[in-house]
Every structure is written in C-alpha cells, then in structure tokens.
Amino acid sequence: NVRELRNMIERAITLSEDATIDISHLHPAPLRANISNPFVSATQNIQTTVAAPQVVKKLPSEGLERYLENIEKDILLNALNMTHWNRTLAAKKLGMTFRSLRYRLKKFGLDTETEQEV
C-alpha cells in the first residue's frame, strides 16, 4: 500500500537524527495470521529482539506537518544537487516518477530552472 509506505518513510525520517535512514528507523510490517494453519500460536511469529525505535529528542516547534515538509524539501534539494538538477535522474534516484517529482517541486516552489542552495 502506497500510503503505508509513505507513512513508514515519513516516520523513519522523523526518527532519524541525521540524513541517513537505517533499518532501526523502519517499523516492522504487521504480522499476518497464518491462514493455512489457523491453530498455530500467534506468538510463534513474534520477534523478541526488535530494537525499540529511537525517541525524538525534542518536538519540532513548527509542528509535525511542517517539519516533515522541510525534511522532504531538503531531500528533494539534495537529490537535485547530486544530479546537477537533472530532474529525470533525481526522480529515478528517489524512486518516484518524474511527474511526482515535478508536483513536489512545484509544491515547494522549486520548479524553477535555476539551482537552489541546500
């Protein structure tokens, strides 16, 4: 589900303290019941060694929505700078369509041809 993936990525970005997301920032997928054998104990599939997610040290003063928008904007700018503002390549590196990237650039006022500072 695209919405679940987006929410998981936004949560991981929020929990990471720097620009790198690693496996500890990702919430594990919900466990699904074993349909082929409904009598199997539900606790057999539970991992007991999953690390607890890091707690954000301080709450963003601008609110969560604006905070996440700022992070998304920074990621877009980093991808554009890495690709020398080649939007097609930036979209590919970000794993999104060119159209989706163009929409986000317009949303953040980054749809001009001039390069922006990070």
Image: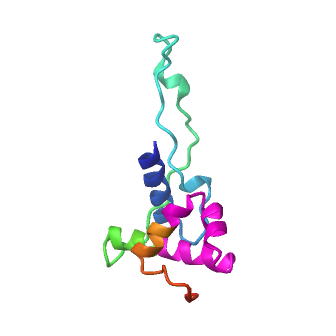
List x then y, in percent, for residue 74.
52, 76
Q: Looking at the image, which is closer to me, 115 or 28?
A: 115
Magenta residues, as a range? 72-101
Q: What's the coloring here? A: rainbow
Residue 88 covered by magenta stretch: yes
Q: Quadrant of the C terminus?
A: bottom right
List x then y, in percent, for residue 57.
43, 71
List x then y, in percent, for residue 67.
39, 73
Q: Most prominent secondary structure in the magenta stretch?
A: helix
Image point (61%, 76%), residue name? 80
Number of marks in the rendered image: 0
Q: Looking at the image, which is closer to me, 102 or 27?
A: 102
- Up the image or down, 60 lies above or below 34; here it is below
Q: Looking at the image, which is closer to me, 38 or 116?
A: 116
- Up the image or down, 37 lies above or below 114; here it is above
Q: Looking at the image, which is closer to me, 27 or 58?
A: 27
Determine which quarter of the picture holds residue 59.
bottom left
Image point (43%, 53%), residue name? 7
Image point (65%, 75%), residue name? 86
- Up the image or down, 93 lies above or below 2; here it is below
Image point (60%, 64%), residue name? 91
- Up the image or down, 112 lies above or below 88; here it is below
